[in-house]
Image (cartoon, rainbow, N blue to C red):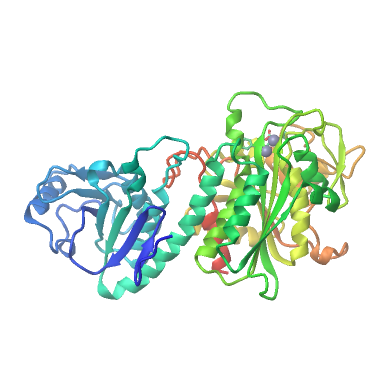
């Protein structure tokens, strides 16, 4: 990681500095409000005359209307290049619009704009300017590990200078620095999700976590390998992963473990490829099931974001890693298994495997005296049917907690939509003829809700006291939002890295 003090910030291949100087370095980026017909006075400082008249012409002629997320590139002028960025109507513009505008600018950048940029804002608060930078950083991502590159491309580093007043610079710098750290977490989640399944399997994920933790004094990673998982009685994890030559494992991250008291515990579904197992999926689009470890990527990315931003509280994350394959030794529909909780599960469909690995992850979470447990999973196609790619499904055994997560999502513009955890769904999932629970609902309907109701059976009571109170828990079904989200302005394609920002916000603002 690069660092440029005192007010410097380094992104993946983007360095953002904050400056009160009038100089313009490289291409000028001007975020503008709708209805403005000439460059605002506060923006004019140091602008060459030719550039000024070129900008004023497109504004006066109405060629650039500054609609939300619009951009216009002026590259012909002798005095330098400009990108105009639309924010929408002043007075109606939120931090989210600034973030989207920053992302739109970055999406529009081509080689001709060079690598140096200066952003000059008009009438924007520090939070808004920082959000614009955050949008630029988030959108500055492409997964090209598997493409041949020429040397020039690999070296290009973007230098972005945000101009603001002297008195704003320290606060802006601090915020941008925080967003840089969070963006690293989002991009890590995206890298993990985009990696092809022949190179991303349980052991690789575990190795990456192990290597990653070496960079931080305050994070420990424990890997429970296949043999240990069998010994420990992780029957759900083992049942899903045993049919693959890439054996399953559980990876546990502990941050600031010596801090006393209860802590958030995050749990992630990490199916590095979901064929459906013996209940084999149809062939069309099966490649998309490489994203089925999105929950574990969210959890790992969140730990990175927390570590990068210097979080001082204790946080635990548990990822349940397995590859769901058909094989002679794979779990069959009809098998009855028993996991850590001691409850038996009738496996009626091996494609409903996420809930099996999570049943062990959730139970294991109880060992860490959780303040609350949140699990993340690309769990059901039914959730995508219900909410499309626009919102994550959100269930909780505590209404206030569910509202808190919903609001954390709103705060960072990542929608998590409240869904019902009804007794009828729990009844459906505990109504097996021969076991304590069943991994499949009785009919076709309400599949995302029955999945959530199944998970609830494996959320332990506090201190595992059978008469005690169930630990506060929420389930986030990210099947639709972790990938394929075309309306997500921060992402061009592939894994989205959704909810790293939500959960960072939730944990650090509590
Ligand atoms: N990984 C899938 C869910 C999924 C579907 C994620 C589409 C992303 C996009 C999950 O393991 C699964 O196959 N669920 C089944 C459950 C069913 C058998 C009860 C489903 O949704 O069809
Ligand atoms: Zn499945
Ligand atoms: Zn799955």
Can residue 467 be seen by looking at this rendering? yes
Give the x, y percent position of residue 27: 21, 51
Can residue 505 be seen by looking at this rendering? no
Which residue corresponds to the image point at 57% horizontal and 72% vertical from the top-left? 312
Q: How many marks?
A: 0
Q: Quadrant of the N terminus?
A: bottom left
In the displayed structure image, the side of residue 72 where residue 49 appears, left or right: left
In the displayed structure image, the side of residue 50 where residue 129 appears, left or right: right
Please determine whether, in this image, residue 168 is positioned above or below residue 286. Answer: below
Give the x, y percent position of residue 383: 63, 40
Q: Nearer the viewer, residue 416 or 362?
A: 362
Q: Quadrant of the C terminus?
A: bottom right
Give the x, y percent position of residue 302: 56, 57
The quadrant of the rendered image in which ligand 2 is seen is top right
Q: Name the image quarter holding residue 62.
A: top left
Q: Nearer the viewer, residue 262 or 259?
A: 259
Quick one: which residue is furthest to the right in this view? Answer: 434
Which residue corresponds to the image point at 80% horizontal and 58% vertical from the top-left? 460
Give the x, y percent position of residue 288: 58, 33
Quick one: which residue is furthest to the left in this view? Answer: 49
Quick one: which residue is furthest to the front in this view? Answer: 151
Which residue corresponds to the image point at 56% horizontal and 37% vertical from the top-left? 196
Q: Name the image quarter holding residue 167.
A: bottom left
Please determine whether, in this image, residue 426 is positioned above or below residue 406. Answer: above
In the displayed structure image, the side of residue 207 where residue 5 appears, left or right: left
């Amino acid at each position: 990681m690069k660092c440029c003090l005192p007010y410097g910030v380094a992104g993946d291949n983007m360095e953002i500095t904050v400056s009160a100087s009038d100089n313009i370095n490289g291409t000028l980026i001007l975020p503008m409000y709708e209805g403005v017909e000439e460059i605002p006075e506060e923006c004019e400082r140091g602008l060459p005359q030719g550039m000024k008249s070129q900008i004023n012409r497109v504004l006066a002629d109405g060629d650039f209307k500054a609609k939300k997320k619009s951009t216009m590139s002026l590259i012909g002028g002798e005095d330098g290049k400009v990108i105009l960025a639309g924010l929408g109507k002043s007075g109606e513009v939120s931090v989210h619009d600034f973030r989207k505008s920053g992302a739109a600018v970055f999406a529009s950048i081509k080689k001709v704009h060079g690598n140096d940029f200066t952003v000059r804002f008009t009438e924007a608060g520090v939070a808004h300017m920082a959000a614009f930078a955050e949008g630029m950083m988030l959108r500055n991502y492409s997964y090209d590990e598997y493409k041949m590159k020429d040397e020039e491309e690999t070296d290009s580093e973007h230098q972005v200078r945000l101009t603001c007043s002297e008195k704003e610079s320290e606060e802006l710098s601090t915020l941008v620095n925080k967003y840089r750290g969070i963006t690293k977490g989002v991009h890590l989640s995206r890298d993990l999700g985009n990696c092809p399944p022949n190179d991303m399997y349980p052991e690789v994920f575990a190795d990456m976590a192990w290597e990653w933790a070496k960079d931080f004094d305050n994070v420990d990673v424990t890997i429970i390998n296949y043999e240990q998982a069998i010994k420990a009685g992780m029957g759900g994890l083992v049942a899903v992963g045993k049919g693959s030559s890439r054996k399953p494992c559980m990876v546990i991250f502990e941050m600031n473990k010596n801090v006393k008291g209860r802590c958030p515990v995050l749990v992630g579904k990490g199916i590095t490829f979901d064929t459906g197992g013996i209940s084999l999926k149809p062939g069309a689009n099966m490649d998309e099931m490489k994203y089925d470890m999105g929950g574990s990527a969210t959890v790992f990315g969140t730990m990175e974001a927390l570590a990068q931003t210097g979080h001082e509280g204790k946080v635990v994350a548990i990822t349940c890693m397995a590859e769901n394959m058909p094989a002679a030794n794979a779990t069959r529909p009809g098998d009855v298994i028993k996991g850590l909780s001691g409850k038996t599960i009738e496996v009626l469909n091996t494609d409903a495997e996420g809930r099996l690995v999570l049943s062990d992850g959730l139970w294991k979470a109880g060992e860490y005296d959780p303040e609350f447990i949140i699990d993340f999973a690309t769990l059901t196609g039914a959730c995508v049917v219900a909410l499309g790619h626009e919102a994550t499904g959100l269930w909780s055994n505590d209404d206030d907690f569910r509202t808190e997560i919903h609001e954390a999502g709103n705060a960072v513009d990542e929608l998590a939509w409240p869904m019902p955890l009804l007794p009828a769904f729990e009844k459906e999932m505990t109504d097996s003829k021969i076991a304590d629970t069943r991994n499949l609902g009785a009919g076709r309907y309400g599949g995302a809700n029955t999945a959530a109701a199944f998970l609830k059976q494996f959320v332990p009571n506090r201190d595992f006291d059978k008469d005690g109170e169930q630990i506060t828990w929420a389930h986030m079904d990210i099947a639709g939002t972790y990938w394929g989200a075309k309306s997500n302005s921060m992402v061009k394609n592939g894994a989205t890295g959704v909810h790293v920002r939500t959960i960072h916000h939730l944990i650090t603002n509590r």
